[in-house]
Image (tube, helix red, strand yellow):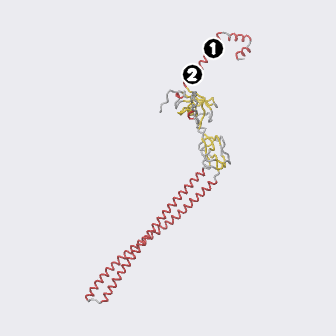
Amino acid sequence: MDGDTQLLTEAPPTLRQQATSLLKSPRARRWMAAGAALVFLLVTVRFLLDRAAYVSTADARVAADMIAVSTDISGRITSVAVSEGDQVTAGDVLYTIDDREAVFTLAEYEAEASRLRAEIAREEARAGLATSKAGSQVAARQAGTRSASASVEAARSNLETAQQEHDRTKNLLDQGRIPKSTYDQAKNALETAQQALLRAQAERETAAAEQRTASISGEEVRLSDFDLSVLHAKLDQAEARVAAQKVVLEQHTIRAPVDGMIDELFYDAGEHSLHGFRMALMHDPAKVWVSANIKETDIRNIHPGASVQVRADSNPGNVIKGHVTGIRETTLSEASMMPNPNASGVFTKITQRIKVRIKLDPSDVHLRAGTMVRVRIAKSDRPPAKP
């Protein structure tokens, strides 16, 4: 029983008779038909205007960058610091992995670096003493060489004087003017001067040899500098190992790479993690967008920058505004992991869909990644002019 019949049944008899006669009158029926036609016309016009101004689709969903957090090492998980659904910030601890072996290795590398630093300090002190000693020896030998050279010159001058005295006394002896004993004294003095010159020359050669020996000691100090260079290179290598091991130690603590929410955890405490395997899945709820699949027949009317109206299935009473930020150059089927080529020879034409990315304006509507939405994208014949 419909509503009109029920009203007629419950109305008083007189009123019921009047209403029945009114409904049965041709005029009333014409008015009712005209009203229904008007309502249908308004709905049709609105549908056509909407279709002419917008591209609508229900094949759209909220999307987000899903970040898979993995580990660079293998080991036993000692603790899980978060739960699924927790909000975290970048740097928060998610997992800790047993790091005792890494700690011991780091201590070993640091001890080796400390040993090399001590050895370098000892060799630098030794090289400093050797340099000072070699410098003093070189200076002393140079002074001895100069003294020996001066002695040679003095002996040579004495020899020349003795030679002149010898020649003079020999002439006087030949003339018979002096006794032979005087000549013998002059001859002895000449021979003494000759021996003194030879001795001075030998001492000069000895001083020169000692100076060369002192210079060689200075070269040995330079060899110590080379040894220090080798030790410094070994220290750099040891410090690099320490730095690398610190990185390995840090890798035993798995941290959140960005701000976001933990969607899924794949390990529990006590399990053994594997190198390169993902340990958690997370996304940033504040950075979501809408991914809409538009028919290829409508894509020509959509351009980046076009305004969009979005209604979430989880909250259809609120409209979220946004705009198109990107349109893919391939269809969904072409970009899929397993394209479906027509190899049977039987062809059925199917309208393809192209993915469109929509950026949402800030709103109070809470959107979850993966939930469905309906979108209305404003059509335009040409793309907006670039600023």
Residue 314 point in image, percent of width and height = 64, 31
| Above or below, 39 relative to 370 | above
x and y, in percent, of residue 98 in the image: 65, 51
Q: Amino acid at mark 2?
A: Leu
Q: Amino acid at mark 1?
A: Ala
Q: Which image quadrant is residue 378 in?
A: top right
Dot 1: few (<14), some (14–19), or many (≥20) neighbours within 10 Å?
few
Q: Are marks 1 and 2 in contact (CB under 8 Å)?
A: no
Residue at numbered disc 2: 48
Q: Residue at x 31, y 81 (%)?
A: 163
Residue at the limit of the structure toward the left, as seen here: 175
Could you say which is closer to the camera, residue 346 or residue 142? 346
Which residue is denoted by mark 1 in the rendering? 33
Q: Secondary structure at mark 2?
A: helix
If the image is split into quadrants, where does the N terminus sit? top right
Asked if 1 appears above or below 362 in the picture, the reply is: above
For the residue pair 187 and 306, the one nearer the viewer reads as 187
Task: Tell me the residue at 63%/14% (across/down).
Answer: 33
Give the alpha-carbon distance from disc 1 to disc 2, as whole Å.
22 Å
Q: Residues within 10 Å of mark 2 (few under 14, many from 20)?
A: few
Q: Quadrant of residue 315?
A: top right
Q: Position of residue 346 (x, y in %)?
A: 58, 28
